[in-house]
Amino acid sequence: MPSTYEKEAYQFLAAYRFLSYALAGMFTQVVPALSRPAITEFQLYIVLAILGVYTILKVFSPLRWRERTPMTYLILIGDFVLCISLVIATNGLNSSFLLYSLTPIMTAALLFEESISLSLAAVASFSLSITHLVLSPYLKTIAWIMQGHNLTLLIVYTLFCFVAAVVPYRINLNIRRRIEREAIIQERRRIAREIHDGVAQSLGYLNLKTKQVSDLVTSQETVKALNELGDVRKIVQDTYEDIRESIDQLSAEIKNLPIIPALSSYTSEFGSNNGIKVQFKTTKGFPNLSPVAELQLLRIAQEALTNVRRHALASEVGFKLENTRETVIMKIKDNGQGFVLSDLEKAPPGYHGLAIIKERAEGLGGSLEITSTPQKGTELKVTLPLEKVRL
C-alpha cells in the first residue's frame, strides 16, 4: 500500500502532468505562432490525442519506485526519452511541450536519488543545445541557437530543469534529517528516563541495602545480614537482566530486519533465555510499515515482554500482530499473576514501564489498552492507525 508521502507525490505529479498537457494544447491551438509546428495540423491533433492517452495511463499506473528493479529505471528513462523526443520533434526550444518534458525530472527528484534527477536535467539541456546547434542548418523549423530568443529560452529551460531536479530532493532530505534528529532526541530522552528509573534507582537501593548490611554485621546480627545480602543479590541479578535486555534491544535495532522476522527472532530468544513459552502469530499479507513504526513496535514488544519477566511470574505469553483495513494491532497476553489497574497509579516510577509503551503508541497516533485480573493474567493491546504507520 502506498504511504501518505507517495500519495501526495503522485497527486502532485499527476496534477503537474495534466496541467502541462493542458497548457501545451492551449499553446498549440490558441497561440499557434509560438509553436510553429514542424508537423501538419492533423498530425498535431494525433500527437495531442496519443499524449493525452499516455498521460492518463501514467497517472493511473503509478511507478513502483520502491522496488528499484531494472524495469523501474527503464520506465523512468523511457518516459524521459519520450518527452525529450516530443520536444525536439515540435521545434525544440519553441515547442509547446517544454513544461511537459520536466515531468520525468520531477519524478526522479521526488522518488529517486538526486544523482538521477540531475543526470536527466543535464541530458535534457544538452539534448536541446545539440539539437539547435546541429540541426538548424538542415531543418527550417529548428532555429539557430543565437536566433531570436533561443539562447534566453535555453538558459531559462536549463535553470528550470536543475531547479526541478534539486529543490524537491533537498526539501525531502531536510525533512528526513529533521525527523531523524527528533527521533534521536526522543530516544536519548527515553534512554535517560530508563536509566534514571531503572539502573539509577537500583544502585541507590543497593547503596541503602549495603549500609544496612554493614550496620547488621557491626551489631553481629548475622542472620538478618544474610537475609539482606540475599535481597542485594536479587537486585544485582535484576539490574544485570535489565542491562542485558537493553543491549539486546540495541542489537535488534542494528540488525535492521523487517518487523515480522525481527519480532519472531526476539520472541524466540526471549523465551529461551527466560524459560517462558512465547507463541508468536501474525496475519498473512501484513502490510509494510515505515522504519519508524517498525522500530517503535519492536520497542513496545521488548518493553512489554520485559514487564512480563519482571513482574508477571508467567509461564506462557501469547503474542499476536494483526491488521485490519484501518489499523495495526499488537496483542500481548500472559498467564501471570495480573494486577489491579488502579494500583498502577501507586506504583513507583519505572515499575511497569507502561508509561513508555503508552508514549510510544501515542507518538504513532495510536492507543494502549490494558486488561488485567489478579491471578488471571494481563493483556496489553496496542492499536495504531494504518494510514500513519504504513510504508
Image (cartoon, grey):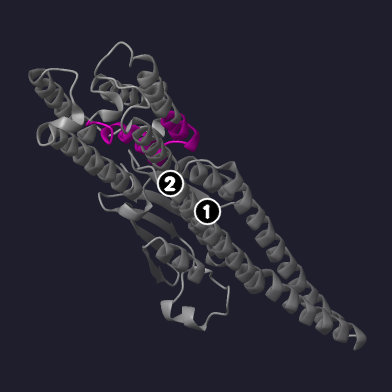
Judged by depth in the image, the label closer to the viewer, 2 or 1, is: 2
- x, y percent for residue 276: 55, 52
Q: Is residue 126 magenta?
A: no
Mark 1 — residue?
A: 177
Residue depicted at x 39% and y 27%: 124
- x, y percent for residue 131: 36, 19
Q: CA distance from mark 2 to mark 1?
A: 15 Å
Residue depicted at x 32% and y 33%: 149
Q: Using the image as rendered, state which of residue 6 and residue 116 is in the foreground.
A: 116
- Could you tell me if residue 379 is visible in this image? no
Mark 2 — residue?
A: 167
Left or right, 48 with reference to 88: left
Left or right, 353 with reference to 201: left
Span shown in magenta: 96-121
Secondary structure state at the residue bearing disc 2: helix
Quarter of the rendering occupied by the C terminus: top left
Outermost residue to the left: 42
Secondary structure state at the residue bearing disc 1: helix
Q: Is residue 109 magenta?
A: yes
- Could you tell me if residue 130 is visible in this image? yes
Outermost residue to the top: 138
- x, y percent for residue 218: 92, 86
Quarter of the rendering occupied by the N terminus: top left
Q: Amino acid at mark 1?
A: Arg
